[in-house]
Image (spheres, helix red, strand yellow):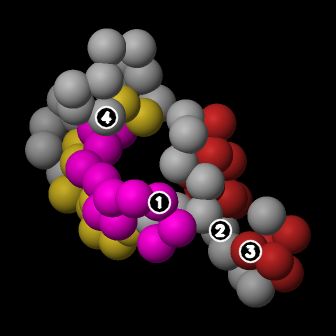
Amino acid sequence: MNEMIEAGASPSSVKFTKTLIKKGFPFCFMKSYQEMGQVDQVMVDCPFMNSVEHALLVNGKHSVFQPGDSK
């Protein structure tokens, strides 16, 4: 987080990265963002995880939700 802040990352970027870490997506970064209506889609790239790219839903009831996850 410190490196992001020192490099000039926006507060919303830092907050999103912290949320990803809490949700089990460490060392991931946003690759794309698509507005879809009630919820939006974010593609994150996780180079150190088994599956590199993940589609996540954001801005809904849960701050970050992975389709297919029952949590």
- Which percent across, then down, holds residue 9? 67, 74
Residue 41 is inside the magenta segment: no
Q: Identify the mark nearer the N-term, 3 or 1.
A: 3
Residue name at image x 31 percent, y 34 percent: 66
Residue name at image x 47 percent, y 60 percent: 49
Magenta-tinted stretch: 47-58
Identity of the residue furthest to the front in this view:
50
Q: Identify the mark nearer the N-term, 1 or 2.
A: 2
Q: Identify the mark nearer the N-term, 2 or 3.
A: 3
Q: CA distance from mark 1 to mark 2?
A: 25 Å
Say if 41 sits above or below 51 in the image: above
Residue name at image x 42 percent, y 22 percent: 62
Which of discs 4 and 1 lies nearer the camera? The answer is: 1
Identity of the residue furthest to the left in this view:
36
Q: CA distance from mark 2 to mark 3?
A: 8 Å
Question: Where on the picture, by quarter, is residue 71?
Answer: top left
Helix, strand or loop status at disc 4: loop
At label 3, the amino acid type is Met
Q: Identify the mark nearer the N-term, 2 or 4.
A: 2
Question: Where on the picture, by quarter, is residue 14?
Answer: bottom right
Kindly identify which residue carries mark 3. 4
Helix, strand or loop status at disc 3: helix
Residue name at image x 30 percent, y 44 percent: 56
Q: Are marks 2 and 3 in contact (CB under 8 Å)?
A: no
- Which percent across, then down, holds residue 35? 19, 51
